[in-house]
Image: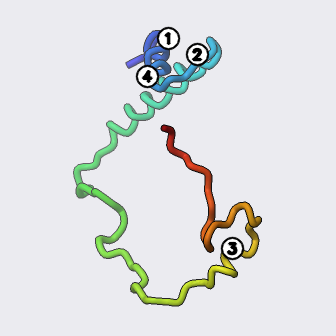
Amino acid sequence: MAFTLEDIEHLAALARLKLSDEEKEMYQAQLADILAYFDVLQKLDTSGVPPTASILPKDTTLRPDAVRPSLPPETVLANLDEADREANQYRVDAILEG
């Protein structure tokens, strides 16, 4: 399957990208190379390879939860300007509109 410039423009529109003509041609060539590599992969004999959902073992090693003392607020807030502190907490600007 070959990508046309219209396909590239459609993909760019879906991704909300503005591409120059040079970029469209570059991506068209790169996507063609990627698809050609998939054709190579399709020719591999994978009949003896079991299906794999993950290469990681089912039981990952996690450290046990342990209650530990936290840092005192004075240490945590030591490098903050007074304007960035509020009642022993970080003061941050609101990020929500409205």
What is the C-alpha distance between the residues marked 4 and 2? 17 Å
Tell whether label 1 touches label 2 (CB within 8 Å): yes
Labels 2, 3: front one: 3
- Seen from this angle, which residue lies furthest front? 87
- Give how far across and how far down residue 29 sits, in percent: 54, 21
Check residue 80 in the rendering and tell me which mark sits there, or answer none. none
What is the C-alpha distance between the residues marked 2 and 3? 52 Å
Q: Please determine whether, in this image, residue 19 is positioned above or below residue 41.
A: above
Q: Nearer the viewer, residue 10 or 87?
A: 87
Q: Which residue is mark 1?
A: 5
Check residue 25 in the rendering and tell me which mark sits there, or answer none. 2
Name the amino acid type tagged 1: Leu
Labels 3, 4: front one: 3
* Left or right of 42, for residue 89: right
Tell whether label 2 touches label 4 (CB within 8 Å): no
Name the amino acid type tagged 4: Leu
Q: Residues within 10 Å of mark 1 (few under 14, many from 20)?
A: some
Residue occupying the point 39% across, 79% down? 61
Labels 3, 1: front one: 3
Q: Please determine whether, in this image, residue 17 is positioned above or below residue 60.
A: above
Identify the mark nearer the N-term, 2 or 3.
2
What is the C-alpha distance between the residues marked 2 and 1? 7 Å
- Give how far across and how far down residue 79 sits, in percent: 76, 71
Q: Which residue is mark 4?
A: 14
Q: Residues within 10 Å of mark 3 (few under 14, many from 20)?
A: some
What is the C-alpha distance between the residues marked 3 and 4? 44 Å
Labels 1, 4: front one: 4
Q: Quadrant of residue 30?
A: top right
* Left or right of 65, for residue 47: left
Identify the mark nearer the N-term, 4 or 2.
4
